[in-house]
Image: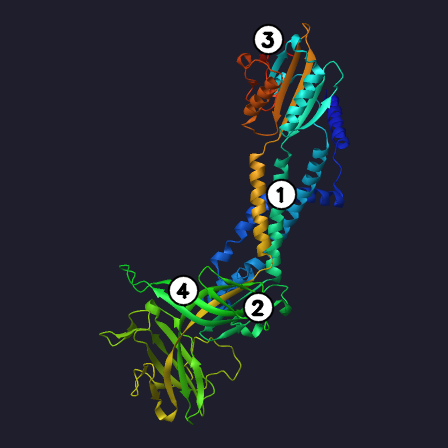
Amino acid sequence: MSERVKTNKRTVADAKAETALPALGPWGMVRWGWTQLTSMRTALFLLLLLAVAAVPGSLFPQRPANPSVVTQYIKDNGDYGKVLDTFQLYDVYSSVWFSAIYILLFISLIGCVIPRAIAHYKAMRSQPPRTPTRLSRLPEHGTLVLESDAGIPPSEAVSDAAGLLRKRGYRVDVRDIDGAKPSLGAERGFLREVGNLVFHTSLIGVLVSVAAGGLFGYSGQRILVEGDTFVNTLVGYDQFTPGTNFQTSQLQPYSIQLDSFDIQFDRESVGKIGQPIDFTAKVTTREAPEAPALQQVLKVNEPVSLGGTSIYLTGNGYAPVVTVRDGAGNVALQGPVVAKLQGDNYYSSVVIKVPDAKPDQLGFVGFFLPTAFVGNDGISFSGDPALLNPRLTLNSFHGDLGLDAGTPQNVFELDVADLTPLNARNLDAGGLTLAPGMSIDLPDGKGSISFDGVKRYIGVDIHHNPGQGYALAFALLAVAGLVVSLYVNRRRVWVRAATAPDGSTTVEYGLLARGEDHRLAAEATAIGALLADEWQVDPATQQSPSSSGDNSPDSVSTPAGSTTATGSTKPTKDQ
């Protein structure tokens, strides 16, 4: 017994050794990996992963949008902020891992679409499948009996059915027309797969368009005071964010001048008085230096298009016009100073830096109030956003502003740590409060400052995205392809005719859908009605085609007699 067990064990071991699968090898592994990557399951997974990978871009400040905010965020969060920077979470959309997902999705979609397109092209050129032996096993089928006195032989019946199906949009192939049992195969709905392919190809087009926008596009911001002109050059931007492959030759030399800016405030709604309800900027534009000037209107959500860029109105405020003279009486600064909005009713902060003043540089920090009021605590505030009672309240300083060292500074901030105060509320000289037209001398003969008037300014965002139009076109095309793939059904129809023993002609037809098709029964009814009308079968005696409720012909049990629609009530035998 033990020898027999040992023999059986050796036999099993030998069998396993003989049936062992060969190793894939390097090339086999490459083919396996390509198969996995180009599967639709992988494409859907990568698409979901791309959406998840984009989430950190909305949770953390992004360096391309505002580098200063990112720098401050890292300072405020210490080691945690540095770790996030290590994983490129402040540059999500240009990070290595986001780009890897993007490229893999692009390759996966191409690998899915091309083989499917080739297979669909071959299917469109191939003939419909052969006629099944038993049409009564199809989900939808019916039978018509043409009496012998009608004089319609099987070949003519099949030819008539072929003509009707062609008019209905089917591609028809007639078989054995001169035989005893001529038949035809017909199919329609190839647009379903075409729509599917168009949808996936359009997704690739969207990805390419978005990538082109990131590579060759650019964006920037500029503040324009009334009367100022912006020329589309690098030095003309306050902040500029180029694409990866941006070239300065892409900048079209157009110009835009802010002629006037008007704000309409709500003066009627209770609880909303003083809120801005409409912004209108009137601008003069030129597509090129030699081009004629055009008068245009820039509004919120109504950008101006120039030189392939879109110019959006994104902000606004007041710019007090000041003149600063130094200790020698020379004009060291003259013109509008942008006031940064800080609170309600256009309460704005003002920073004035005068590096050209002699013998000491001058600096001013304070607030601009469009409609100034003084509270019981002696603190000034703005009671209305309109220019009803404008005031400048400032503190003045002298010393080294730190600009000569070349270190970048925020124009809206003044570091007063190394400056000597001249005017402030806690000093004997007090603070500076200026109304339009006023001029005040600074202490110690350091100069003077005058408030000459007020202008308005706007902030504009300038975007150039060469792939934006293509992305929109591909997105619309994707929607169209998706609609077609959802509403067009792939169907096949077979018709067979034969001569019965009594001389009548029996016509069988059956329908099969590829996938779910809840309208297949209605299509079968319509085809049956067309055939009956063609051969003038009495509709009163016509029965509806039978439906098994399943689109799989192998899962249908056939009754002893199939549904008939005849000129008489005589049933026919199952073929």
**Residue drawn at the location 56% of the way across and 36% of the way down:** 486
The kind of residue on which mark 2 rests is Glu
**Residue drawn at the location 48% of the way across and 75% of the way down:** 228
Nearer the camera: disc 1 or disc 2? 2
Q: How was the colour assigned to the protein in this rendering?
A: rainbow
Q: Quadrant of residue 571?
A: top right
At which x and y percent is residue 49? 56, 48
Q: Earlier in the sequence, mark 4 or mark 2?
A: 4
Describe the element under mark 2 as helix, strand or loop.
Answer: loop
Q: Residues within 10 Å of mark 3 (few under 14, many from 20)?
A: some
Which residue carries the number 2 mark? 287
At which x and y percent is residue 202? 61, 47
Numbered mark located on residue 198 in the image: 1
Placement of 186 over or under 144, stated as above or below: below
The kind of residue on which mark 3 rests is Pro
Q: Are marks 2 and 3 in contact (CB under 8 Å)?
A: no
Which residue carries the number 4 mark? 279
Q: Are marks 4 and 1 in contact (CB under 8 Å)?
A: no
Which residue carries the number 3 mark? 571
